[in-house]
C-alpha cells in the first residue's frame, strides 16, 4: 500500500482516516481533531489506482463494493476530504495566491498597446 499510504499521510491534516487494506492490516492517518472515517479496501489493485486518480477510482470502487465504509458513511468520507480542500483554498487566499490577476494598463484603460511607450522606472 506504499504509494497510497504516502499520499494519505501527507493529505490528512484535519481528522482521522483509518484504512483496512485487502490483507486486513490497519493504517491510520490522523491530523488535528476532526471527522473520523474508516474504510476497507478489498482489492489490492486499488492502492495504485487511488494513488494516480483518486477521484475516478474511489467512486468506481465504492460503486463496485471494493471500497466500503465501516462505522462511517460516504458523507463522512466526503466531509473529511473537503475539509482539506477548503483549508488549502483559504490559505492560498490568505497568502494572496488566489488574488485576481492584474490587467495590463492598456487593457484596463481601453487604449491600444504601443510598444516602446511603456512607463519606465529609473534604475537605481
Image (cartoon, helix red, strand yellow):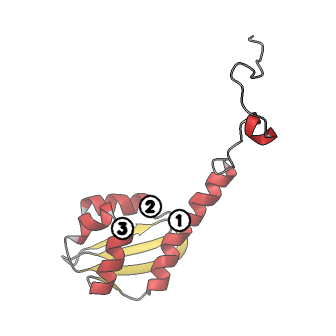
CB-based contact (under 8 Å), mark 1 and mark 2? yes
In depth, the one of 40 and 117 nearer the eye is 117
The image position of residue 43, as x and y in percent, is: 20, 77
Picture quarter with the N terminus: bottom left
- The reply to whether the C-beta atoms of the residues labelled 2 and 3 are less than 8 Å apart is no
Mark 1–mark 2 distance (CA, rounded to whole Å): 7 Å
Q: Which mark is residue 11?
A: 2
What is the secondary structure assignment of the residue under circle 1? helix
Residue 38: x %, y % from top left? 38, 80
Image point 31% across, 79% down: which residue?
Answer: 60
Q: In the picture, residue 40 is in which quadrant?
A: bottom left
Say which of marks 2 and 3 sits in front. 3
Q: Residue at x 28, y 58 (%)?
A: 3
The answer for how far apart the CA atoms under marks 2 and 3 are is 12 Å
The residue pinned by badge 1 equals 84
Residue at the spot 71% in from the left edge and 18% down from the top edge: 116
User: Which of disc 2 and disc 1 is earlier in sequence?
Assistant: 2
Residue 32 horizontal side relative to residue 63, left or right? right
Crowd tier of the residue under label 2, counting other residues whose Cα lies within 10 Å: few below 14, some 14–19, many 20 or above:
some
Front residue of 50/21: it is 50
The tag on residue 68 is none
Which tag, 3 or 1, sits closer to the chain's start? Answer: 3
On screen, 85 above or below 61?
Answer: above
CB-based contact (under 8 Å), mark 3 and mark 1: no
Is residue 4 shown left or right of residue 122?
Answer: left
Residue 4 vs residue 118: left or right? Answer: left
Residue closest to the eye, 107 or 61 = 107
Amino acid at each position: 500500500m506504499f504509494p497510497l499510504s504516502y499520499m494519505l499521510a501527507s493529505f490528512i491534516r484535519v481528522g482521522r482516516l483509518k484504512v483496512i487494506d485487502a490483507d486486513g492490516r490497519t493504517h491510520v492517518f490522523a491530523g488535528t481533531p476532526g471527522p473520523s472515517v474508516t474504510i476497507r479496501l478489498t482489492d489490492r489493485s486499488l492502492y495504485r489506482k487511488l494513488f494516480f486518480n483518486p477521484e475516478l477510482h474511489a467512486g468506481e470502487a465504492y460503486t463496485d463494493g471494493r471500497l466500503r465504509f465501516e462505522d462511517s458513511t460516504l458523507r463522512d468520507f466526503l466531509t473529511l476530504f473537503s475539509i482539506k480542500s477548503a483549508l488549502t483554498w483559504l490559505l492560498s487566499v490568505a497568502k494572496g495566491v488566489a488574488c485576481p490577476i492584474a490587467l495590463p494598463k492598456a487593457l484596463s484603460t481601453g487604449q491600444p498597446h504601443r510598444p516602446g511607450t511603456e512607463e519606465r522606472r529609473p534604475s537605481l
